[in-house]
Image (cartoon, grey):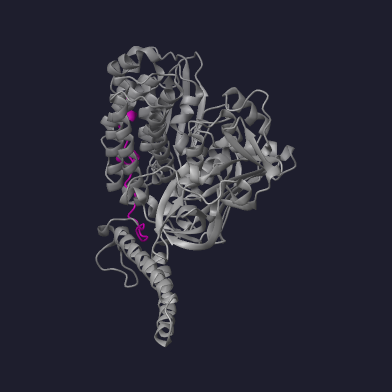
Amino acid sequence: MTLDLAQFHQTFFEESFEALGSMEAALLKLSAGEADEELINTIFRVAHSIKGGSATFGFADVAAFTHTLETLLDQLRSGQRQVQSGTVDVLLRSVDVLREMLAATQRKQPADAALAAGLHAELQAIVKSPASAAVAAAAAAPAAVPVIAATTAIAMAEPGGVAISGWRIRLAPGAQMMEHGNDPLRMMRELAGLGALVTRVDASKVPTLAELDPEVCVLSWQMELRTDADRAAIEQVFEWAIGECMLSIEPLSAEPAAVTPAAATAPAAAVPAAATAAPAPAATTKPAPGAPEAARGSSGEGGSIRVSIEKIDELLNSVGELVITQSVCSQLAASLEGRPANDLRNALVQFERHMRELQENVMRVRMLPIASIFNRFPRMIRDLGQRLGKKLELKMSGDQTELDKTVLEKIGDPLVHLVRNAVDHGIETPDKRSAAGKDETGTISLHAYHKGGNVIVEVSDDGAGLNRDRILAKARERGLVGADEELSEDKINNLIFAPGFSTAEVLSDVSGRGVGMDVVRRNINEIGGHVQLYSTPGKGSTVRIRLPLTLAILDGQLARVGKEIYIVPIVSIVETIQIKRDQISSLAGKAELFRLRDEYIPIVRLYELFGSQADNTDLVNGLLMIVEADGKRVGLFVDELMSQQQVVIKSLETNFRAITALAGATMLGDGHVALILDIPGVIVRYLDQPARSASSREAA
């Protein structure tokens, strides 16, 4: 069964336009002199994500343009090139062109090819120029030379037909190449930007007009490109068409050119209209969930209606308020006596049952199967396997597991990064797998399932596993780990989540630029999730992501500190321990550590962190909740553990202001407000306290 990717187009366009807005805002901050590293990382991640999505959906023009843009941003990010006003101007114009290209693609109309080609040439000129000459190169960059113009120029410059150094290229498109958005003429324009191009078209297979299919290219081309560019640069022009065409690239020798000027000029100009990119056929499937109303038609299907997500959010918020009110009523009724009180309590029990059903039904409206994310990957696995010369098999299970729409939107990019890393870094080439006694075909597995009120998503491969020695060496080279510092296997594994960390020796559009794993952890943490990594050398790796079912309701553990009640997300809790005095150590009087088996864990006194009063200040008289986030563990010192319950999350930022270490607040059944802890924020706030020593930071 052929997967129809058109159902995901609308989501891609919506996310891309939003991302371009954040990219533009970051560029404007750069132009104002705020040369912050995180700003450049944000801009780079936007370009990287748009390029990957464009390639997946076959929007080759957008992918090619963004690849060059990404290369320039990588130079800025790595410090090879300084941020200058001229460069920022070019990048801002790139945002405008990308926005126009995406809008035209969304409308299924041709974009302004001349504008895109001209700016593409400017970007290439900056990338290839010395850092000091970047602005001058951008200003002096010529407009892109059309293929035919380049051909004519060669005929005049080389009347004897003597070939210079370059490449002989033969291209014969397959039946579906243009259907997937790969335009041969665009490829020729890119080749012309690398040097002097001579082309000859073979139109011998063009059928009669009655038999002509405008979506199938029956032409083929022979080209000679005179350039000093290497083979990799030539292959990059055709990278999105690999597997969908017959392609031959051979070096030119110092012999008379195989293509004469006369043969090169006329046929190139006579390329029929069939060689241009045909419009995509009209979609016959149902529009994506986020598609505009017009795309769905006015007749309707009878079984469903389209409702904006804002209305569902308002409904869910109202139900949450009713749940709180019901809980307050139940507590008030508990103190009443007599027969009317019993009748009231019985009525409230029924009311509670109906409220729970209403709450679950409203939440279910926001739920979507994770298949909407998983279905991106069959085509991606196929394309990556062809490009990297690897045999791959994708196994998926649990794709009907449902998640809140907002959670789904947040995990899309992290899963893409994980799958690409598994293919590029995890799965070996067929010869290496055979030498290791494995099947030549590597397996990528995607698995989703419910567990303990959460959804678990696993991305696994049966590849080589993590090379811990190489990871540790790279971390020491970057100063992330001391020269003599010894780390456990788990801590070495977690080094790959550091921003910009990569062990790749060769840069590619698949991986090796140090983007991905830090984004995975950040996006998952933002939605209250948790990431774990397991790897066995020679057998493969598994990344396990624990996700909340919804962002509106939280499963929490109530913990009391004095008169204050804090709610700790259950997903972050490892275990709870009664402290013994011989398990406590102190570092320079500024940090307290708890010895948990073979590990020392910093103790965080919540009453000190938030400036409240506690019943107990002696650690032996309280409890220690071991919590984990971002691969770090700390112990939260509390007076008492209370009940576990689901709570409706209220945003502090909306109703008050954002506070580090607090994810929100909720109303308890007795009418009191309880603060919900953000465990990653708690760790950051603890480490950022002025009195905290370097030793305690290392322990954390």
142 relative to 378, above or below: above
| Residue 437 in picture, x, y percent from top left | 75, 42
Is any atom of residue 61 visible in this view? Answer: yes
Figure disc tally = 0
Q: Is residue 135 magenta?
A: no
Q: Nearer the viewer, residue 226 or 96?
A: 96
| Residue 76 in picture, x, y percent from top left | 41, 23
Is any atom of residue 208 visible in this view? Answer: no
| Residue 301 in picture, x, y percent from top left | 32, 70
State whether the magenta stretch is mostly helix, strand or loop.
loop
Quarter where residue 104 is shown: top left
The magenta segment is 265-289
| Residue 670 in picture, x, y percent from top left | 41, 65
Quarter where residue 161 is shown: top left
Q: Residue at x 28, y 56 (%)?
A: 292
Q: Nearer the viewer, residue 245 or 5?
A: 5
Quarter where residue 630 is shown: top right
The furthest residue to the bottom: 339
226 relative to 212, above or below: above
208 relative to 94, above or below: below
Q: Nearer the viewer, residue 135 or 179?
A: 135
